[in-house]
Image (cartoon, rainbow, N blue to C red):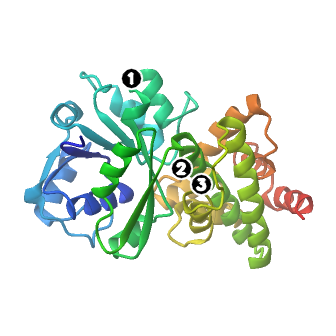
Amino acid sequence: MIGKIAVLGGGSWATAIAKMLLEQTDEIWWYLRRDDRISDFKRLGHNPAYLTSVHFDVSRIHFSSDINEVVSNCHTLVFVTPSPYLKGHLKKLKCRLRDNFIVTAIKGIVPDENLICSEYFHQIYNVPDENLAVIGGPSHAEEVALNRLTYLTIGCADVQKAEEFASHLGSSEYVKTKVSQDVIGIEYASVLKNVYSIASGICHGLKYGDNFQAVLMANAAQEMQRFLQTVYPMADRNIIDSVYTGDLLVTGYSNFSRNRVFGTMIGQGYSVKSAQLEMEMIAEGYFGTKCMKDINRHLHVNMPILDAVYNILYERISPSIEIKLLSEAFR
């Protein structure tokens, strides 16, 4: 049973998910950290900071800056906070989560823990696997805002729960959903595609053309498959499914991709800090690159693209040198 649904997070993707939910659900709860944002939202009828073109009937939204109030009133919790901030929000919790249905739409890894979010909820908060779900793309919040056709995959060990939650997202003309049991694969793929999107942006900033971008994305898909089959082998996983390769392609090519924009700035000569300051939004792939590098130190998967992005972002190796070396390894 899905019960009352809460969205936790106030960014673009959180706003897009709230939009989809309210098209199929009478009301939702919405946790926003700042009371001034809640006041502005109620007054304006839209998120004052993200996707401002999307207007909401605020009478159908229970806003709260108290995470405990939201969790205690709702059964289904959709977490859409940036991964670096997840631990900080959860530290405020006084109620347990194990009986809630947890849906993570966070496309990142919990820093310091080096855990994908579903594993973090499972290990730290004892949420059973059947109560954990993920939302996979390909999906840009900006296109959801424009009612452009979007395909989502809901991953959960309990297929019935996945299908029930999917019905709350995908009954409109522009949202199509399917379900999967590959929770871990979907989550890791969503982290890796952000890393590869940064690589794509770096190459774009360095003036590499479409021919090379296609080779880069093909190699990224192979690299992703190698990692997924090592960390969580599945005989029936098809890497060309939309939730894997589709999400990889849209994040690597689209101008809506903040990770690609971030990578482009790095390729053009920006420092990491200056690119982050100018963007004013979090590029999850920056944090994901370090986490994935740390995870792979124990797995030893051949991941030359991840290594190249890590060297550029964290070892300060010249992008032009690193990408040239990477290009010579491609065929």
| Quarter of the image where the N terminus is located | top left
**Rendering coords of residue 148 (x, y %):** 39, 76
Please report the residue visible at 30 percent of the width from the left and 57 percent of the height from the top. 167
Q: Amino acid at mark 2?
A: Glu
Secondary structure type for disc 3: helix
Mark 1 sits on what residue? 125
Do the residues under discs 2 and 3 have CB atoms within 8 angstroms?
yes
Circle 1: residue type: Tyr
Q: Is residue 289 left or right of residue 102?
A: right
Say the numbered circle drawn on residue 284: 2
- Evaluate if marks 3 and 1 touch, with contact meaning CB atoms under 8 Å apart: no
Q: Is residue 276 left or right of residue 169?
A: right
Location of residue 234 by image quarter? top right
Q: Give the mark count.
A: 3
* Label 3 CA crowd tier, 10 Å (few <14, some 14–19, many 20+): many
**Few, some or many residues within 10 Å of mark 1 (<14, 14–19, 20+):** few
Nearer the observer: mark 2 or 1; the answer is 1
Residue labelled with disc 3: 194
Between 239 and 115, the one nearer to me in the picture: 239
Residue 108 against residue 139 in the figure, above or below: above
Assign a secondary structure to mark 2.
Answer: helix
Neighbours of disc 2 within 10 Å: few (<14), some (14-19), many (20+) = many
Residue 309 in view: no
Depth check: give the residue in front, 105 or 327.
Answer: 105
